[in-house]
Image (cartoon, rainbow, N blue to C red):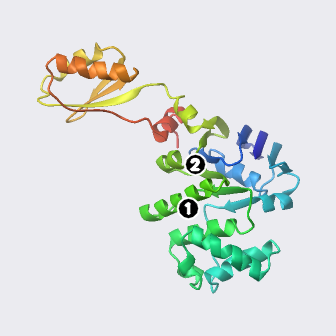
Amino acid sequence: MLDISHLTKRYGKFLAVNDLNLHIDKGEIFGFVGPNGAGKTTTMKIVCGLLDATAGSVTVDGVDALKCSKDIKRKVGYVPDFFGVYDNLKTMEYMEFFGSMYGMGKEEVDAVADGLLELVNLSDKKDVFVDTLSRGMKQRLCVARALIHNPDLLVLDEPNSGLDPRARFEMKEVLKNLGSMGKTIIISSHILPELSEMCTSIGIMDRGHLVTAGHVDEIMNKSDGASKIHIQIVGMEDKDDIRTFMAEQPNVTKVNFTEDEVLVSFNGDEMAVANLLKNIIGRGIAVSGFYKEKENLESLFLEITGGNN
């Protein structure tokens, strides 16, 4: 569906995107992860035909995005991080306005818009003025607007920015529904746990470079392998003795303490975790709680980028 080869974008001496190579298959939900200024928005705007590249090539379903910007805009639906709405337009009129830009007549737009507004849970807002909608509703309306011409690729730049938890949940459900319909989606977000739940593949950018990309499971396996184990102990008076004992255990790489628990960095498998618990109990240490922290996209992102913002 999307092929990017050696993509480079310069603004004077500043290198915003540096020799980026990426392939996204049809039907993928691809999550773009990276700190501010990493080059995500620049890359997405080039894919959408909204920005020229300095070098490289971009094709969407065989169409050259750098040479055929008019054609590419029929292939792509774009939801920017900030967008405006038009005063004195009702929701259905808003959809008709954008449909007309793609040469669609009123009857055709109305037929398509009915289904799209139902998809984004705005069917009951057809006759409501757009500027009176909540921010979350406006975001979902922008998704419906971007789909009005049935694009092959939907590109969303920080669609959950500024939304409250309920609005984020509603947006996530909309995107999951689109994914189940076979739409190819690129989405950037700083809300990393939500990306890991929605996306089939991710790419991590840092300072213009695509550091890593692939299916979510493959990316997660690129972690250094260290898990964090939380251990609550009753009567944890002799911390030095506990620290020494823990540090002597196989696969333990680091031992830290909080007010009420021991935090252990551990690089063994599930059986090794079970043996660690067995050894602790065998030592006579009173364990009241024991769990392994689940690896997540946020911790991997910080590990790869070094926690840079």
Q: Which mark is residue 174?
A: 1
**Secondary structure of the residue carrying numbered label 2:** loop
Amino acid at the residue labelled 1: Val
The x and y percentages for residue 154 are 68, 57
| Nearer the observer, 90 or 16 | 90
How would you rate the neighbour count of disc 2 (Cα within 10 Å): few for under 14, some for 14-19, many for 20 or more?
some
Mark 2 vs 1: CB contact within 8 A: no
The x and y percentages for residue 109 are 73, 77
Res 142 visible: yes
Residue at 61%, 41% (x, y): give it: 201
Sequence-first disc among 2 and 1: 2
Amino acid at the residue labelled 2: Asn
Q: Which mark is residue 119?
A: none
Q: Is residue 206 above or below residue 197?
A: above
Residue at 83%, 74% (x, y): give it: 103
The x and y percentages for residue 5 are 79, 39
Number of numbered discs visible in the structure rendering: 2
Q: Is residue 104 above or below residue 31?
A: below
Q: Which image quadrant is residue 216 in?
A: top right
C-alpha separation, residue under disc 2 versus residue under disc 1: 25 Å
**Secondary structure of the residue carrying numbered label 1:** helix
Q: Which image quadrant is residue 16 in?
A: top right
Res 84 visible: no
The x and y percentages for residue 73 are 79, 61
Q: Is residue 291 above or below residue 66?
A: above
Mark 2 vs mark 1, foreground winner is: 1
How would you rate the neighbour count of disc 1 (Cα within 10 Å): few for under 14, some for 14-19, many for 20 or more?
some
Residue located beneath label 2 in the image: 36
Residue at 52%, 38% (x, y): give it: 301
Name the side, left or right, on which 55 lies relative to 233: right
Residue at the right extreme of this rendering? 67
Residue at 73%, 74% (x, y): give it: 98
